[in-house]
Image (cartoon, coloured by chain):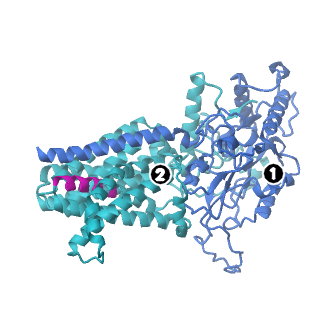
Chain colours: A blue, B cyan
Amino acid sequence: MGQLAGPTDPTADAHWEHRHARKGFFTDTSICIGCKACEVACKEWNQNPQDGDLRLLESSYDNTGSLGASTWRHVAFIEQGPERIEQARQSGRKLVSLGMPRVGPPEARPQTAPEDTTPPDTPEFRWLMSSDVCKHCTHAGCLDVCPTGALFRTEHGTVVVQDDVCNGCGTCVAGCPFGVIERRTDGTAAPRTKRGEQPGARPEVPNVGIAQKCTLCYDRMVDDQTPACAQTCPTTSIKYGHHDEMVDQARERVAELHAQGRTEARLYGANELDGVGGTGSVFLLLDEPEVYGLPPDPRVPTADLPQMYRRAGLAAAGMLAAAAVAFAGARS
Amino acid sequence: MSLSEFDSYRPPEQPRRRRRDGPRRRGAGQGAGGDGSREMPMVPAPEFTSYYGRPVVKPAPWGHEVAAYLFLGGVAGGSALLALGAQLTGRNALRRNARLGSVTALGLGGAALVADLGRPERFLHMLRTFKVTSPMSMGTWILSAFGAGMGTAAAAEVDRLTGARLPLGPLRPVLRAVEGPAGIEAAVFAAPLAAYTAALLSDTATPTWNAAREDLAFVFVSSASLASGGLAMVTTPVGEAGPARRLAVLGVAGELIATKVMEHRMDPVAAEPLHHGQAGAMLAWSERLALAGGLGTLLGGRHRALAVVSGLALLASSALTRFGVMEAGIHSAQDPRYTIEPQKARLAARRAAGITDDAITTAG
């Protein structure tokens, strides 16, 4: 058992003898164009089945919904007006004034007036797009609570499910503070009754009943290949490489954006002191995380597990005492 | 929802289908009148925003089987303690009934757990590892160790009940010899069996369960105590059921107190699902039945019929507690509000206290 919280090297923590550099993503949402090529490439490479029926979700261009058992990349689309843009800019500025560590001197940032900046969006409207993915946390909630050992830490510091070991207990689904991992269903809950659709026309769904999530293309990584999503991304919004370099790039990029007056830019997951010990997938966001459907202050539940065990032990002792009292009272 | 002015010529959009009733605050994508389609509110919208009202964390894919197991595991554990006490104090009917009740609850609970797996045929994979960070793994080992002892003790009871007709052969004296130690071994793992399920639920990102992590174990062991006491009151003549009655009353008192303390110490937003909807109704009825069963036990526990009715009320109360807590947690995971608001509140509290270096969102 390794460390349960705080900064650490997850590969060393998992007792890998031959250490590789930790790999990760840097998803720069400021240059995402919402083409969803990452979603397609991910599905193609990993041969993930269709998620339920095709339908429109009435949420801008997002008809994927969320990350899940068969969706390991999900592009979020958010439409915002001027008020919300200003709010995002202010909340980003607040983060700077908190005195957080960053690259570059603070005076590099010029006094901002909205007219001086040349943001790619008009001030009246902006369209946020962000490709979400498994965070491959330093302290992964899913991995900690897995009772079968199906989830494991790879030599590259990522978290992967072994689908021949997982028995589908579902603990990891609740254990993930980001809502990423999910147990795959075969979709039979919703019978296909629409006209013209043949039952069984869809290919058989693999790995039904097993928890599934992004593997950071473990099969490609061991051959020194780039994960499918990063390989296909036409704008380099999704970058892949050594985790340290990704974090450095992210810090440079956010400093660059701040220097342009775009104080709404901020990093998500780059702080190793946060509740999950930093994430393997780092994001540059242009608004608060909950706007993108990300938790604002995630904390790996296992960090509090020693305390939970202590409380459970105390409660168990109380139960024993109650039983003892029940029988002792009978004798007197 | 579009903010383009050309879209004002569109027909009004259908409201999105909601999964639940009750007031909900708006998600980020929904317009608050900024498109001119209606009057803008003068009071700014509450701080809470979400991605189209979609959940942030995923609910555990656990059905009623797991809630039933929480109940049955508690009954099995509590009954094992009663069985050991009866074994040590020479209450033969109570010992027999508690052991048989325990092993029945254990068998049903175990079957429910296996049935809830995504791949039930792989249930033995649980025994591949011994993993302290996984309450499910610890629980599997506790359950296995408990099952070994209680299975042996119950086999001896069945053998005695059937007049030594089990095909044991030369093993019969061995069974008789180990029956007592087996009962003790089962009792060692009985209280952990009743308590670990609280850690199992709390060690998740499910807001309500996680927020209850300090006190949920006390609620669960109390619930297990009153349920196992209730079961023994149903099965055992009043003459020998004295300890069961006392355990039940202690359990009722413990549960009423522990529940109040738990709700008081939880984040107020994360505690809301315990009072709303189906979960709220189940937990309210659980409390009523516990009170009624406890009072019935205190006042009429020596009357056989009243003891049976009180015992049934206590069993129902315990089952409702587990189903209610399960339902509240699932509900709290399905609504992003219960994830986002407590997290924003605790982040703001840490910042107000001067801790500014541990946020996941940073400016660089």
Q: Chain of mark 2?
A: B
Q: How many marks?
A: 2
Q: Which quadrant of the structure image shows residue B232?
A: bottom left
Amino acid type of the residue that numbered disc 1 sits on in the rendered structure: Gly
Mark 1 neighbour density, 10 Å: few (under 14) some (14–19) many (20 or more): some
Whole-percent x and y of residue A313? 39, 42
Q: Nearer the viewer, residue A324 or B359?
A: A324
Q: Which quadrant of the structure image shows residue B46?
A: top right
Q: Magenta span covers which residues? A: B76-89
Q: Nearer the viewer, residue B151 or A325?
A: B151
Contact (Cβ within 8 Å) of mark 1 with mark 2: no
Give the residue displayed 76% in from the left and 38% down from the top: A286
Q: Is residue B87 magenta?
A: yes
Give the residue displayed 33% in from the left and 42% down from the top: A317
Q: Is residue B59 left or right of residue A250?
A: left
Give the residue displayed 36% in from the left and 37% down from the top: B261
